[in-house]
Image (cartoon, grey):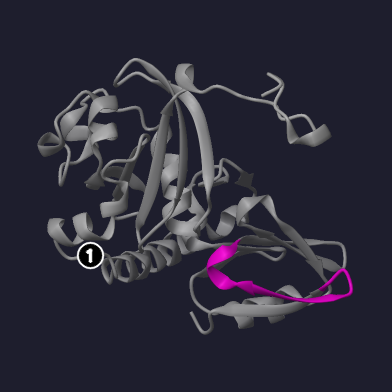
C-alpha cells in the first residue's frame, strides 16, 4: 500500500479515511461511493481512477465501476463474496485474472499479518492482560488462523481469564495456546466470519447467538487488539439484565 489513508471531499467536507477501513468503492452515476467498515459510506466526485491510484496495492479493480479491498474478499464465484456477507457482480471474462491477482494480494496480506506486534510469550500476554484476571466477565484475546486464501479457519486462545474457563467448562491450561477446533471439534464457523472482520478491518462487533459447543446462548463483543488478533468479551445471554434509567432525576425504574 502506498499510504495509510486517503483524503477526499464528501458532502462538501474534507474527510480522511484510513486505507485499512475501506471495503470497496463503486460508481453511482458521476459519484464514487466509498464503503467503509462499520457500514459507513461516503460519496465523492473523486474519480475511481484517482482513488485507485491513491489506494495503491491491496485493491482489485473487478470491473469498470468497482474497486474492492483484497482482504475484504471471501471468495470469487458467480459473484464476489465479501467477508461482511455482501456480494458484488464483476466482469466474468476477467475471472482467471482476478483470481490470480487476489492470490498474490492474499500472500502479501498473510506476510503482513505474520509481522505481528503481539506479545511474544504466554507470560507476556499474562502481564499485558493482568487487569482482566479477576474480571467478573469472560475475556479472551484470540489470534486468528488464516488459510492460503486469507480466510479465517480457526483461532488460538492467547490469553483467557478464569471467567472464560468457567464459561467454556475447561481449565485454563486446556485453553491457552490451543486452537478452538482442537478443543471443540463441533466448531460452528459462524463465529469465524465475525472475528475475521474484526481482525482484518478493525471493527468492533457484537454477536448474539447460540453456541452449540457449550449449548449456551451468548452475547459476544469483539474488538481489535493486535494485528491479526481480536479481544472478546463474552456473556451468557440468560444472565444479562437490562435496567432502564428514567430521565427525571436519573433514577432507575425501581426508584432507588
Q: Is 19 colored magenta in this rendering?
A: yes
Residues shaded magenta: 10-22
Is 150 situated above or below 49?
above
- Return the residue nearer the eye: 40 or 223: 223
Task: Please name the residue shown 42% across and 29% down the image.
Answer: 235
Estimate the x, y position of residue 23 in percent, counting from the top left: 59, 59
State the predominant SS element of the stretch in magenta.
strand
User: In the figure, residue 14 lies in which quadrant?
Assistant: bottom right
Is 132 situated above or below 224?
above
Left or right for 70, reference 231: right
Estimate the x, y position of residue 60 in percent, counting from the top left: 55, 67
Under circle 1, the secondary element is loop
Identify the residue at the far left of this view.
Answer: 173
Is 212 situated above or below 103?
above
Estimate the x, y position of residue 36 in percent, counting from the top left: 64, 59
User: In the figure, residue 33 lies in which quadrant?
Assistant: bottom right
Left or right for 150, reference 21: left
Left or right for 37, reference 245: left
Is there any visible trace of residue 131 in the rendered image?
Answer: yes
**Which residue carries the number 1 mark?**
119
Q: Is 6 colored magenta in this rendering?
A: no
- Return the residue nearer the eye: 151 or 192: 192
Task: Please name the residue shown 32% across and 65% down the image.
Answer: 113
Amino acid at each position: 500500500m502506498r499510504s495509510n489513508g486517503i483524503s477526499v471531499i464528501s458532502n462538501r467536507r474534507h474527510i480522511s479515511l484510513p486505507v485499512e477501513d475501506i471495503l470497496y468503492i463503486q460508481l453511482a452515476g458521476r459519484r464514487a461511493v466509498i464503503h467503509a467498515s462499520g457500514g459507513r459510506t461516503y460519496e465523492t466526485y473523486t474519480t475511481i481512477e484517482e482513488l485507485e491510484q491513491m489506494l495503491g496495492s491491496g485493491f482489485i479493480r473487478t470491473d469498470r465501476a468497482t474497486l474492492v479491498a483484497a482482504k475484504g474478499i471471501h471468495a470469487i464465484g458467480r459473484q464476489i463474496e465479501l467477508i461482511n456477507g455482501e456480494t458484488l457482480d464483476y466482469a466474468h471474462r476477467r475471472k482467471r485474472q482476478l483470481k490470480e491477482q487476489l492470490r498474490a494480494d492474499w500472500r502479501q496480506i498473510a506476510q503482513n499479518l505474520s509481522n505481528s506486534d503481539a506479545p511474544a510469550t504466554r507470560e507476556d500476554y499474562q502481564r499485558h492482560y493482568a487487569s482482566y484476571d479477576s474480571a467478573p466477565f469472560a475475556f479472551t484475546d484470540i489470534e486468528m488462523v488464516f488459510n492460503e486464501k486469507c480466510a479465517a479457519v480457526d483461532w488460538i486462545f492467547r490469553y483467557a481469564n478464569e471467567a472464560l474457563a468457567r464459561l467454556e467448562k475447561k481449565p485454563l491450561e486446556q485453553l491457552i495456546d490451543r486452537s478452538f477446533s482442537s478443543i471443540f471439534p463441533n466448531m460452528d464457523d459462524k463465529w469465524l466470519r465475525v472475528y475475521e472482520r474484526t481482525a482484518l478491518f478493525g471493527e468492533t462487533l457484537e454477536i448474539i447467538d447460540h453456541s452449540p459447543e457449550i449449548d449456551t446462548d451468548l452475547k459476544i463483543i469483539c474488538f481489535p487488539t493486535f494485528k491479526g488478533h481480536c479481544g472478546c468479551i463474552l456473556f451468557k445471554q440468560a444472565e444479562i439484565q437490562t435496567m432502564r434509567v428514567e430521565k427525571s432525576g436519573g433514577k432507575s425504574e425501581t426508584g432507588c
